[in-house]
Image (tube, grey):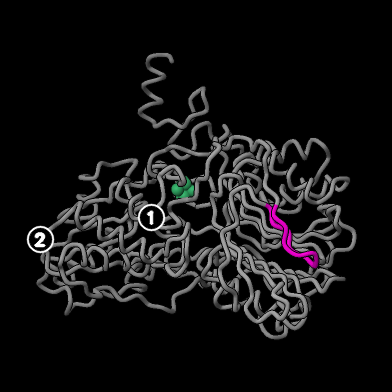
Amino acid sequence: MGKHDTQISTSTANALGAKAVFHVSNLAYEGEFQDTDGFSSDVQDGDRPQEECGVFGIYAPGLQVARRTFFGIFALQHRGQESCGIAVSDGKRLRIHTDMGLVSQVFNEDVLAGLPGHVAVGHNRYSTTGGSNACNAQPISCLSSDGELAVAHNGNLVNTVQLRRELEAEGKTFETTMDTEIIAKLLAMNSDLTLEEAILKMMEQVSGAYSLVMMTRDTLIAVRDPSGLRPLCLGRLRDCQNNDCWVVASETCALGPVGADFVREIEPGEIVFINSDGIESVKFKGEAPGHEPRQALCVFEFIYLARPDSQLLGQNVHAARRRMGHLLAKQAPVDADVVIGVPDSGLPAAIGYAAGSGIQYQEGLIKNRYIQRTFIQPDQTQREMGVRMKLTPLDDVLRGKRVVVVEDSIVRGTTTKRIVQMIRDAGATEVHLRISSPPYRWPCFYGIDTAARKDLIAFQKSVEEIRAYNGADSLDYISMDNLIEAVGAPKHQFCRACFDGQYPITIPDDVRYTKLVFESGDPGPESEGGFTLNEAGEIETPQEHEARETVGV
Ligand code: SF4
């Protein structure tokens, strides 16, 4: 079935209660995936939040959809580069192929030819809950009241530990370490209910972020959590004779490559069923544990995570990033000769800053377009060269100039510091940093893998201290008001927690458990990541904790 050795396995399905689900798994990969600090998909890995996952689904009677699913998840590759997978059904049998690696590494013509059918879901993974290894690749499968079910998940549950303990106390065993398996398990254990009823019941049990794309042998299903943390959209194929072919995807950028037009976003708390009866929408009206009763789309999708050609809340992401830069120029002007952006996600805001300031925009840093995640570890010398393997300064643009450098975010600050030095080494006389997001002070628990709070530079240092640390002549961040104006929707429609600490879904006490808690067996220290919880379950800073301890609150 491809250049790698494969075998047909029922192990995952059996662990989830299924009897006859074929899980076609590529076994060529052995051992742990090595994250390659300094070599991965974007310029500032390790110094910025990591993308989460991408999900894709298609229902197209009369068509073979594995190839389109390939192009769908290929378009969503920026959302996860560790593993990927596709499940396909021809109405009789559901087949799944998953493996570690990029979409272009995992799938080829032979593999796709072995996945016949007209319904499919696809997934790209970056590990959030559950480590990065082959058994955690998605889609995963289970047995529902409608038979075999494949599940692909973007987001992160926050009550994973509690639910897993409850399920284990009932005798359930787990084959993976993913929160997605908890969702599958909850659906599988309610096989006496209809699938719709089981999904609604699951939504009353889980807390956190989930955009799900699932399929039975004949039905495609999309589910978005009641807060709508992660994006999910609906599209329609243009080349479908009966106009009954549908696509769901994390982002609208995945629609064009498969020949689909954008129809609408899947609403927060909406469940969509697509099959030979047509398309049916069901709204969750129950109580989702810990969720504020409002939409809370991750505002960081606009700043960095989403592809610039995607649409979110009716806004083009690239245009929103340009507006961020434009507003930042008005808010934080500086006398300078040239504006440059840090590729790729800083470029639209840099163009906007140039337009807003009247200072010329130029490309001042060139990115090596061919650096991707690789299994090859850099040696120490290469690590020290770090950024230079990914970015090269254009000396002719920078020499003798006062340079404004626009970047989308500073998380740890380590890479930004190297970029500032690189620009100075190229001959710039002044370097002024402008950041198109507010200071990143709080960790994310909803599917974005950020540093522990103690490692967030804006938690540790003031803006002036960050400027000094990075060796810049000046530093300014966009204000929250200007960010919200740039994204063009009311503030209350967004999660902004990494900037203001206002979490729209309650974080349970076990937040201190790391994403690898199930592998390590370590329950974690009482205070993890530099923060603790007060008795109300609210996160507090070390200073707040110390003050509370001191006064005995
Ligand atoms: S905490 Fe930040 S990164 Fe996480 S969902 Fe909220 S806005 Fe997005």
**Left or right for 544, reference 475:** right
Residue 385 placement: quadrant: bottom left
Residue 355 placement: quadrant: bottom left
Q: Does the residue labelled 2 lie within 8 Å of ligand 1?
A: no
| 56 relative to 491, above or below | below
Which region is colored magenta? Answer: 271-281
Residue at (83, 40) in percent of width and height? 171
Residue at (19, 77) in percent of width and height? 395
Q: What residue type is labelled 2?
A: Asp
- Residue tagged by mark 1? 487
| 422 relative to 160, above or below | below
- Residue tagged by mark 2? 335
Helix, strand or loop status at disc 1: helix
* Residue 54 visible in the picture: no
**Left or right for 177, reference 525:** right
Q: Earlier in the sequence, mark 1 or mark 2?
A: 2
Hey, which residue is sitting farthest bottom in the picture?
109
The N terminus - image quarter? bottom right
Could you tell me residue 143's position as x and y percent?
Answer: 84, 55
